[in-house]
Image: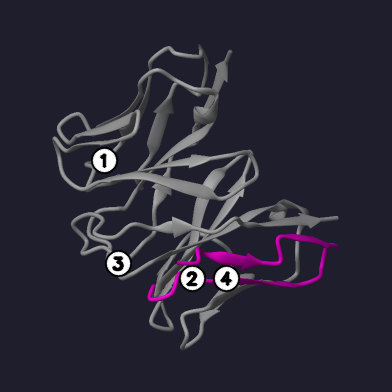
């Protein structure tokens, strides 16, 4: 069974540009979450999509957006890039989701996209 | 919001030694995930703990969840160079449907020959 895949793996952009990252979840998984990882802030939750709907959202500015397609593939977009957006962006997928009383499914992570903003 | 504090921040152990990493939550834990990450790469799933008192083992790694202490521990027996990496604990906030995990800052493990 193929794992979570992310494209591209590496990306270099300049300030003010926009970028789109792609994530293909494990077959059969309907939940896709995005995280940003930086040395200073660690791993932070961006948003989660389930059945094409945003189910949860982290505390990030509106420049960060995402969507999910009917085949569960997901994209995230960052507009008007800033130097501080340089990070490893990780995508994770799971079959369903938690019940609110704790995890019920394993969440699997992709290899990440390393974004560098110059 | 929930904060997860991991200790120690870094660890250097000699091959063959045992070690323990702790993850303490500022709020009640409703389950916890442990992951391992090689620098700059994705997270590798290790274990998921779903209820207080639960203990799981895989190969030489054992994880426990102490709900009362709002803490989880990860124990590695007879460490090997392959165990080196960054260990991260992640927990879902209470009452949330879906995945929006809070993560600790990680524990960096180096295993020396």
- Looking at the picture, the colour scheme in use is one colour
Secondary structure state at the residue bearing disc 2: loop
State the residue position of label 3. Answer: A97
Indicate which label's residue lies in the foreground, 1 or 2.
2
Give the Cα separation between the discs numbered 1 and 4.
31 Å
Pointer 3 indicates a residue of which chain?
A
Q: Element under label 3?
A: loop
| Distance in Å between CA atoms under marks 3 and 1 | 21 Å
Q: Is residue B34 above or below residue A44?
A: above
The circle drawn on residue B27 is 1
Which span is picked out in magenta?
Answer: A1-29
Residue found 59% across the figure and 39% down from its top? B38
| Image label count | 4
Q: Position of residue B43 (x, y in %)?
A: 51, 48
N-terminal-most mark, 3 or 4: 4
User: Badges 2 and 4: C-beta atoms under 8 Å apart?
Assistant: yes
Q: Where does the image place residue B109, in percent across and percent down from the top left?
A: 52, 24
**Residue beneath label 4, please?**
A23
Q: Which mark is residue A49?
A: none
Q: Which residue is mark 2?
A: A25
Residue drawn 24% across the image and 43% down it: B29
Near mark 4 (Cα within 10 A), the count class, few <14, some 14-19 or many ≥20, is: many
Left or right for B30, reference B46 = left
Disc 1 secondary structure class = loop
Residue A22 against residue B73 in the figure, above or below:
below
Question: Which chain does tag 1 point to?
Answer: B
Write down the chain letter for disc 2.
A
Same chain under badges 2 and 4? The reply is: yes
Residue plotted at (38% across, 82% down)? A51
């Amino acid at each position: 069974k193929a794992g979570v895949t992310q494209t591209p793996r590496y990306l270099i952009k300049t300030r003010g540009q926009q970028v789109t990252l792609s994530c293909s979840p494990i077959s059969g998984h309907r939940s896709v979450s995005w995280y940003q990882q930086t040395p200073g802030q660690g791993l932070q939750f961006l948003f989660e999509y389930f059945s094409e709907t945003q189910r949860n959202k982290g505390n990030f500015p509106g420049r960060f957006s995402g969507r999910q397609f009917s085949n569960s593939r997901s994209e995230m977009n960052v507009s008007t890039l800033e130097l501080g957006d340089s990070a490893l962006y990780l995508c994770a997928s799971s079959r369903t989701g938690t019940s609110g009383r704790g995890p019920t499914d394993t969440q699997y992570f992709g290899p990440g996209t390393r974004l560098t903003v110059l | 919001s929930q904060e997860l504090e991991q200790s120690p921040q870094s660890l250097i152990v000699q091959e063959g030694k045992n070690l323990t990493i702790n993850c303490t939550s500022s709020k009640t834990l409703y389950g916890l995930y442990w992951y391992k990450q090689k620098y700059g790469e994705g997270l590798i799933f290790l274990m998921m703990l779903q209820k207080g008192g639960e203990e799981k083992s895989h190969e030489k790694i054992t994880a426990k969840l102490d709900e009362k202490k709002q803490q989880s521990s990860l124990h590695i027996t007879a460490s090997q160079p392959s165990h080196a990496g960054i260990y991260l604990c992640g927990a879902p906030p209470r009452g949330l449907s879906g995945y929006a995990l809070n993560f600790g800052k990680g524990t960096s493990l180096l295993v020396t020959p």
